[in-house]
Amino acid sequence: MKYLVSPFNKEAKIKFPEEITVYDTTLRDGEQTPGVCLRTPEKLKIAKKLDEVGIHQIEAGFPVVSNEEKRSVQAIVKEGLNAKILCLSRTKKSDIDTAIDCDVDGVITFMGTSDLHLKHKIKMSREEILNVCMNSIEHAKDHGLFVAFSAEDATRTDLDFLKKIYKRADDFGVDRVHIADTVGAISPYGMDYLVKEVRSTIKADIALHCHNDFGMALSNSIAGLLAGANAVSTTVNGIGERAGNTSLEELIMSLKIIYGVDLDFDISKFYELSKLVESLTHMKIPYNKPIVGKNIFRHESGIHVDAVIEEPLTYEPFLPELIGHQRRIVLGKHSGCRAVRAKLNECGIDVTKDELCKIVEQVKNKREEGKYINDEIFNTIVRSVRGPFEL
């Protein structure tokens, strides 16, 4: 067995869309994480690795931000990746023209639609933004681009107006509309309701761009797919503004293992991709980060370790090799004889039962003194119990 999840998952009567598109925005929204700045060579590395994984669409950047950003988008396009390359554009013809100049496959054009944004940021009326948005969609479609229209702060927008602007976009031939949960303020039940309302209004594809301010980005994305959406925005490691976005690896692994929906991605590269993004963005992965965190396959508690040595799935829902991760037994105050014996076996060291008990006791004492039990300290403990040895 490579994984084992609850049998009750199959009892839920749910249905996902036949086709689900994942468009990754690590290189755009992910880079908007405060303090993150990716140059062209770094963006190329991430884009190539995303393509190796099999991501359907890569949002390569926001080319009007700077000359470097435009060069990055152009460089990614020139790589000839299998993924479709998109970029972000404001609802301005000049932005669309910049995207055309980059030779991207499509654009995601956006406009704030909530009364809060209209009053305090955009300072335009609803009718005014309707005209502006449709003009930009029309311009992009006239140039043969894939066009997605994103209603920024959609989840705090008046429903009638939101449906109106999506319907108008649909009438203008938009390929996909995006529901942007800009500050992560909707619940999974709210998302279910909203997507069903939007789906009853339009024929275009519906995408979900969820932020994680309340820790519900993944749940909201799943709820939206079940309600009729068929595309999801993700970032590697869930990076992004404030609490970040829907995590790519969490979404794909949840769909594959929890729900049995396989999007045919090469998940064996997930850990490698995760570490690459961590290195290039300098955004450290939390130890307890789902799927790719350092602690996900580390075990210390004696009771757990005993079981994991016998059968890893006793305390793991899937084997780490699936995503290129690895298991590690950690020694500390909770360790028992079996964990220490396993570590000794790794080192090719044989000890008596009495020596083993003494080593376990010293391991616990050292950890309670605040020392991390690395190889050097472990070897010192073993030598103090049984004398010199050769590794």
Image (cartoon, helix red, strand yellow):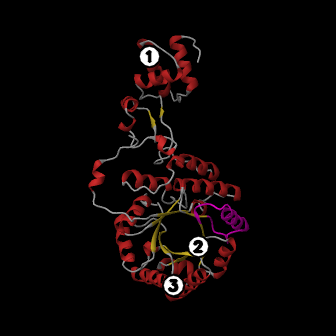
Whether the magenta-drawn stretch holds residue 68 is answered as yes
Q: Which residue is labeled 1 in the image?
A: 356
Lower sequence index among marks 2 and 3: 2
Q: What residue is rendered at 49% in x and 82% in y?
A: 169
Whether the magenta-drawn stretch holds residue 167 is answered as no
Please state which amino acid type lies under the numbered disc 1: Leu
Query: Does 156 appear above or below 339?
Result: below
List x then y, in percent, for residue 198: 39, 76
Segment tinted magenta in the rendering: 60-84
Between residue 139 and residue 154, name the one nearer to us: 139
Give the alpha-carbon distance from disc 2 to disc 1, as whole Å. Answer: 63 Å
Query: Does 54 appear above or below 97?
Result: above
User: Quadrant location of residue 312?
Assistant: top left
Between residue 119 and residue 19, name the one nearer to us: 19
Please state which of the two labelled residues, at mark 2 or mark 1, is closer to the viewer. Answer: 2
Residue 67 visible here:
yes
Contact check, label 2 and label 1, Cβ < 8 Å: no
Q: Which residue is labeled 2 in the image?
A: 107
Please state which of the two labelled residues, at mark 3 or mark 1, is closer to the viewer. Answer: 3
Lower sequence index among marks 2 and 1: 2
Residue 187 visible here:
no
Instruction: Determine whether the residue tagged by mark 3 lies in a helix, strand or loop.
Output: loop
Crowd tier of the residue under label 3, counting other residues whose Cα lies within 10 Å: few below 14, some 14–19, many 20 or above = some
List x then y, in percent, for residue 100: 66, 75
Lower sequence index among marks 3 and 1: 3
Q: Is residue 329 left or right of residue 34?
A: left
Instruction: Determine whether the residue tagged by mark 1 lies in a helix, strand or loop.
Output: helix
